[in-house]
Amino acid sequence: MASLQERLNKWKARKWHQKMGDIVFWLFLVMLIVPGPRKFIATNLNKVMLHLRHPSIENYDKAYQLSAGEYNWDIYNESGQPVTPEDLKGKVIFLNFWGTYCPPCIAEMPEIQEIYDEYSDEVMFVLVTAENPEKVGSFLDDKGYDLPVFFGGRQMPEALSVRSIPTTFIIGKDGRIVTKKIGAADWNSRATRKVFNELLTK
């Protein structure tokens, strides 16, 4: 087995670009192990990947349609007021489940903010998290987001239950779930606008 000195001599004999590759590899490995940098890397990798994912309307006529009872969502706003079925029915809804600890969620948040700025008067945005409102408020303030966040969501109807975040649903005025996207997506896109515009005219 080679001694430490022999290994060091072999490394010194490597070309400069090989040494740089070794250094970058080990730095990357350390950053993956340390929680802070790991989250940074994961978030930025997701930012690259989300531009490959776009929403689309699935077969509208065959889309699952929420019943009147399935609008009883166990969510409440930042003031602690529950959201009622009357708040939701008859609207195009962008329903997103997310968390501040979730790199894919953080990666898609800027795009959600941008599409919200454009469609907030026509589409109801419902971003649901199970986290502490104070922690979420600090996160939004730090990032400069003014998105409508709701809390709870642990007892959603089966059609809207999620096992991982982010998961996003786009729901038509008549309750049809026309889009379900698991994972980060590029929401500030022509594809999203096409979905919204089609649903707003139905």
Image: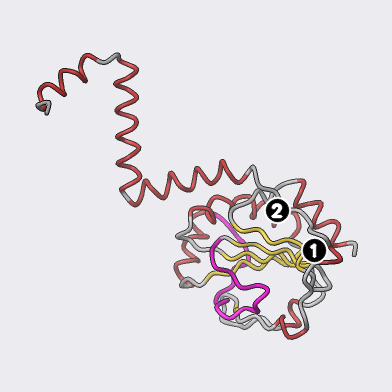
Would you name the residue on which mark 1 appears? 122
Q: Earlier in the sequence, mark 1 or mark 2?
A: 2
Relative to 24, say whether 30 is above or below. below
Question: Residue 162 magenta-drawn?
Answer: yes
Closer-to-camera residue (65/72): 65
Q: Secondary structure at mark 1?
A: loop
Please, what is the three-letter code of the amino acid marked with disc 1?
A: Glu
Residue 34, image x and y in percent?
31, 48
Provide the residue span drawn in magenta.
144-165
Mark 1 neighbour class, 10 Å CA radius: few under 14, some 14 to 19, many 20 or more:
some
User: Which label sits on residue 25?
Assistant: none
Q: Secondary structure at mark 2?
A: helix
Tell me, what colour scheme is on the image? Answer: secondary structure
In percent of width and height, residue 115 lies at: 70, 53
Q: Amino acid at mark 2?
A: Ile
What residue sits 78% from the left and 77% below the top?
89
Q: Looking at the image, is 78 positioned above or below residue 103?
A: below
Name the residue: 61% across, 58% down.
Answer: 182
- The N terminus lies in quadrant: top left
| x, y percent for residue 139 | 48, 60
Image quadrant assignment for residue 150: bottom right
Residue 115's disc number: 2
Magenta part, dominant SS: loop
CA distance separating discs 1 and 2: 11 Å
Tell me if 171 is positioned left or right of 160 in this view.
Answer: right
Count the marks: how many?
2
Q: Which quadrant of the figure contains the C terminus?
A: bottom right
- 197 horizontally vs 188: left or right: right
Residue situated furthest right in the rendering: 201
On screen, residue 148 versus residue 27, left or right, reads right
For the residue pair 99 and 61, the one nearer the viewer reads as: 61
56 in relation to 94, above or below: above
